[in-house]
Amino acid sequence: MNPVQQAVVWLNDPLNWTNPGGVLDRLGEHVTISAAAVLLGCLVAWPLGLWLGHAGRGGGLVVLVSNVTLAVPTLALLTILPLTFLGFGRPAVVVALAVFAVPPLLANAYTGVRQVDPQTREAARGMGMTGPQVLRQVELPLAIPYLAAGFRTAAVQVVATAALATFVNGGGLGEIIRLGFGLSIAVGGGQILAGGLLVAGLAVSAELIFGLVERLVTPRPLRRARRRAARRAADAVTGG
């Protein structure tokens, strides 16, 4: 059998799903690691991005932080962090993936606040609202679609990258791929492909789910404005 046929056979074996260390166990680990990493990234990036956007400065800092974190390979962090007090295992994996999640979360939080109409902000201040009240009651609600977009991007990236957790004993679906490489290609090729398909399927599922959430939290007028902007951009590219 070729690797594709082997992958189909492997995925259709119930024991590969239900045995200890099988797909269901590894899927639970993968989702837990990814959720913890995105949550940690939100706790760091959202307050900073919202505050910088409200203050109206720090755009250069946002770009710098995003560029630096994107420039550092996740695999390098996964290699370095286990040598610290975090040790090998999930804590190091969660921190490394959280660093990877920060750029889209931070950039979208900052952009979401800065896109608020200045007249709306001034009207709120004219009503006697303090700075924190303007942020909480005016800017934050209007920035929610941008926060959702950043969350979707970060979640998909983290889910796809969490397969590397296996290199530092972090678990997840990457374990299936690693164990397949431990066998000969003739024997483990199907398992490697099956593991890759599972990771890809989970990432696509995250994209669809959080894409729907983003759509639900985006007001209809803003959806139409985004579609018009997308059409204008497409026309500019195609010359239409």
Image (cartoon, helix red, strand yellow):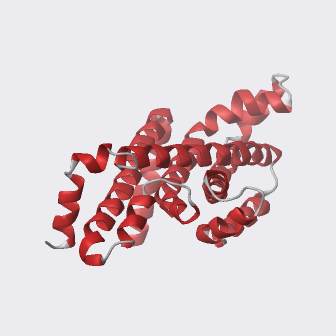
- Seen from the viewer's position, the closer of residues 229 and 20 is 20
Give the residue drawn at x 35%, y 49%: 23
Q: Give percent across and percent down for residue 112.
A: 64, 45
The quadrant of the rendering that contains the N terminus is bottom left
Looking at the image, residue 82 lies above or below residue 35: below
Relative side of 195 to 112, left or right: left
Give the residue drawn at x 40%, y 49%: 21
Task: Tell me the quarter of the picture where residue 142 sits.
Answer: top right
Give the residue drawn at x 29%, y 77%: 185
Give the residue drawn at x 68%, y 65%: 69
- Seen from the viewer's position, the closer of residues 195 and 132 is 195
Residue that sits furthest to the left in the current view: 1
The quadrant of the rendering that contains the C terminus is bottom left
Task: Tell me the quarter of the picture where residue 134 sits.
Answer: top right
- Seen from the viewer's position, the closer of residues 63 and 203 is 203
Observer able to see residue 115:
no
Q: Give percent across and percent down for residue 166.
A: 51, 61
Relative side of 89 to 157, left or right: right
